[in-house]
Amino acid sequence: MKHNDLRSEPVSIVLCGIGGMGAVYVQALLERIEGGEFRIEGAVDPVPERCPQLARLSEMKIPIYSDLESFYLRREAEFAIVSSPIQFHASQTCLALDRGSHVLCEKPMAATIQDARRMARAREGADRWLAIGYQWSFSAAIQNLKADIRSGLFGRPIRYKCLYLWPRDEAYYGRNDWAGKKRNQAGAWVLDSPANNAMAHDLHNMFYVLGGGISRSAVPVEIEAELYRAYDVENFDTAAVRGRTDSGVEFLFLVSHVSRADRGPIFCCEFERGTVFCEGRNTDIKARLSDGSLKTYGCPDQEPMKKLWDCFGSVRTGAPPVCGPDAAMSQTLCVNGMQDSMPEIVDVPRDLLIREGLPGQGRIRVEGLDEIFERGYASGQLPSEMGVPWARRGRKIDLRTYERFPAL
């Protein structure tokens, strides 16, 4: 890596995707742009009208291109922020690395493990770094927790479980043409789901905190999944997943967009000499050690854009950020294994669906789902193991030699 810590000229930035999550990056940058530390060389978005700050970008005479190739034909950027839809992460990241930009790519890393590995190879072939935007990984709370786990404070990890119930409405699935899809209209894999979008952070974090190095994650080696849907979408809106990591840690992941309650993320990681837990959004991560003492790590959601400013600092120093491809790839591998475990999504019986609100603006919830998942979280069981009539068991998938999705 090249070290630029003595440089004083502004860092040049290209924004790839300026709607949705991209608009969050735009706002954060505009709030600090007067400081002169960076300049926005250009933005890339085929539908820039979705960006709330479009008028401001136009006033600043920031050029907007329909694709990233067009930008690089005319300009250069030291730092590319890729916050486009999932199906474009791999191609845009690889192009940006090839053209000399460091890259912060939003989560998830990619739709498929083969694309994630292609991104990792592109990083290795460039004198540049690649970061993936899982903001918890950049937080002091997670970094301090990970350091204590690595130091052996809690002893050997035994099991990790996570429950996240986050209701979403019909507008959520209607906000674009790929929400809830396995593939987009052009046939590219998207695999949009709770596990690969809204709760991707929580799935990634299970592996990240158990990783052997600051920029590494534990790797899932075996998985079985039960995937369900209540909404009229192609992919699942509810998942119950159990698996095992390369170090023998059992993990359980229970998530849904069709619950009654908005509850989570709740997680608990059991160790030989203590338990690490969190009771929900905007709450502190805590650890109870076997001697009865309690340690508090803080809330990992306090600084959601720390990832941006840490990466900005890394452009100047050349030091790679904490969450790169080696850390983020486990989430992609797990999601691919989930989809292969149950390639045909199971429809929840219609007589269990409760519709609330006006058509097109309302939401669907599944009767009894909250209680089923809460029991599963407490007992470590999947719905099919608890005798839920509509539940179906997925096949076990061996991820140790998993090369590409779909594997079956």
Image (cartoon, rainbow, N blue to C red):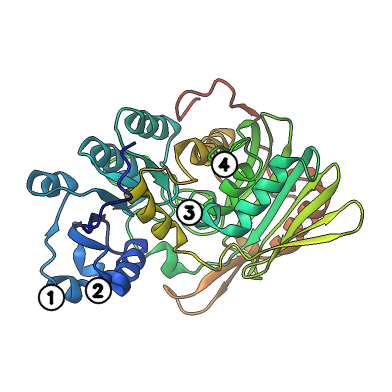
Q: Pinpoint residue 245: horizontal percent, then vertical percent.
A: 67, 33
Q: Is residue 347 left or right of residue 179?
A: right
* Mark 4, residue position: 214
Label annotation for residue 34: 2
Amino acid type at mark 1? Glu
Mark 2 or 1, closer to the camera: 2
Determine whether label 4 and label 2 are within 8 Å by CB.
Answer: no
Determine whether label 1 and label 4 are within 8 Å by CB.
Answer: no
Amino acid type at mark 3? Asn
Residue nearest the observer in this picture, 376 or 385: 376
Q: Pinpoint residue 229: horizontal percent, then vertical percent.
A: 55, 53
Classify mark 4: residues with Cα within 10 Å, few (<14), some (14-19) or many (20+).
some
- The answer for how far apart the CA atoms under marks 1 and 4 are is 41 Å
- Counting residues from the N terminus, which is met first, the one under dot 1 or under dot 3? 1
Q: Pinpoint residue 244: horizontal percent, then vertical percent.
A: 69, 34
Q: Tell me the SS state at disc 4.
A: loop
Residue nearest the observer in this picture, 82 or 312: 312
* Mark 1, residue position: 59
Classify mark 1: residues with Cα within 10 Å, few (<14), some (14-19) or many (20+).
few
Amino acid type at mark 4? Ile
219 to 69, vertically: above or below: above
- Residue at image location 74% in from the left, 38% down from the top: 250
387 to 265, vertically: above or below: above
Q: Is residue 192 left or right of residue 217?
A: left
Determine if residue 40 is in view.
yes
Mark 1 or 4, closer to the camera: 4
* Mark 3, residue position: 197
Q: Tell me the SS state at disc 2.
A: helix
Mark 2 or 3, closer to the camera: 2
Q: Quadrant of the N terminus?
A: top left
Amino acid type at mark 2? Glu
